[in-house]
Image: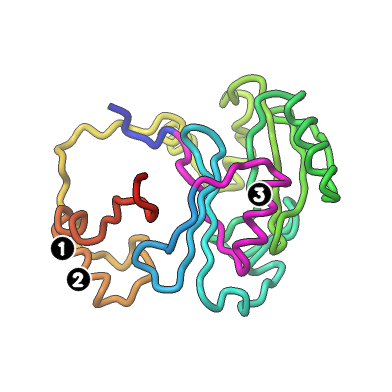
Amino acid sequence: MSQQPNGIHHIAIMCGDIRKHIAFFSEVVGFPLVALFDMHGVPGGLHAFLRMNDFGYFSLVQLPGVDRIPIELGVTHSGSGAAPCAAGTLQHLAFRAADEAELLAMRDRIRSHGVNVVGPIDHGMCTSIYFAGPDRMTLEVATSDAPVEPARWIDPAVLAKAGISAEEAERFKAPAPYSGPSPVAQPPYDPAKPHLAYPEKAYRDVLATPDDVITESASYAEPPVPAS
């Protein structure tokens, strides 16, 4: 049984106008729309899924008032792959192409919709093209012809810049497997750990609720359209 995620199921991007994003990522990028429904448990929210492949989706979320939150380059967005934005925000998003021919086909598809594309650029570990999406998103499509080789691509000088010791680097390159019990009880609330941004009392109540109760009370298993 795998003890690590085996890929990305979906990437969720906030949008002020979900129709604009659906049109762009469907028609320009080529992802088919496969789901659009009221966001589960979130009043006023809309949730869309576009298919990237059999195992991964590109997801869009529209919530009330998002269109009135200002985009601020250097804070909410980077604006390019070389620019800063606030810690914890998305600096840029890179989609995958199977090979360089597919990468060039993607470049041509995107340009055919009047969207500017820069590249391809060979980075050694991948070859990439760059373009912008709605709401000033920084987007990339990249392709690699071989797995990244750690011995060639983990630079000892940059480990030092990042404050990572040689011992830590060895641990990070080969994460220890988990061999303990299952299920594991919810740990006590520790403010030093990462936490979801919910009102504290409500969040603590959720953490105190057994997993099976959460599953039973918060699940939405049925599609919004009845089977024909």
Q: CA distance from mark 3 to mark 1?
A: 38 Å
Residue 32 drawn at (x, y percent)? 59, 42
Mark 2 in CB contact with mark 1 (< 8 angstroms): yes
* Picture layout, residue 158 above or below residue 88: above
Q: In the depicted view, which residue is nearer to us: 156 or 89? A: 89
Q: Nearer the viewer, mark 3 or mark 1?
A: 3
How many residues crowd around disc 3 within 10 Å: few (fewer than 14), some, or many (20 or more)? some
Q: CA distance from mark 2 to mark 1?
A: 6 Å
Which amino acid, mark 1? Thr
The residue tagged with tag 2: helix, strand or loop?
A: helix
Magenta stretch holds residue 32: yes
Q: Is residue 33 left or right of residue 121?
A: left
Q: Which mark is residue 25?
A: 3
Residue bounds of the magenta highlight = 7-34
How many residues crowd around disc 2 within 10 Å: few (fewer than 14), some, or many (20 or more)? few
Residue 33 drawn at (x, y percent)? 56, 47
N-terminal of the pair, mark 3 or mark 1, is 3
The residue tagged with tag 3: helix, strand or loop?
A: helix
At a point 48% along the width and 59% down the height, the residue shown is 47
User: In this figure, what is the number of numbered marks?
Assistant: 3
Q: In the depicted view, which residue is nearer to us: 174 or 194? A: 194
Q: Is residue 34 left or right of residue 95?
A: left
Q: CA distance from mark 3 to mark 2?
A: 38 Å
Residue 17 found in image quarter: bottom right
Residue corresponding to mark 1: 209
Q: Which mark is residue 205?
A: 2
The residue tagged with tag 1: helix, strand or loop?
A: loop
Magenta stretch holds residue 41: no
* Picture layout, residue 19 above or below residue 96: below
* Picture layout, residue 202 above or below residue 176: below
At a point 73% along the width and 27% down the height, the residue shown is 102
At a point 15% along the width and 58% down the height, the residue shown is 213
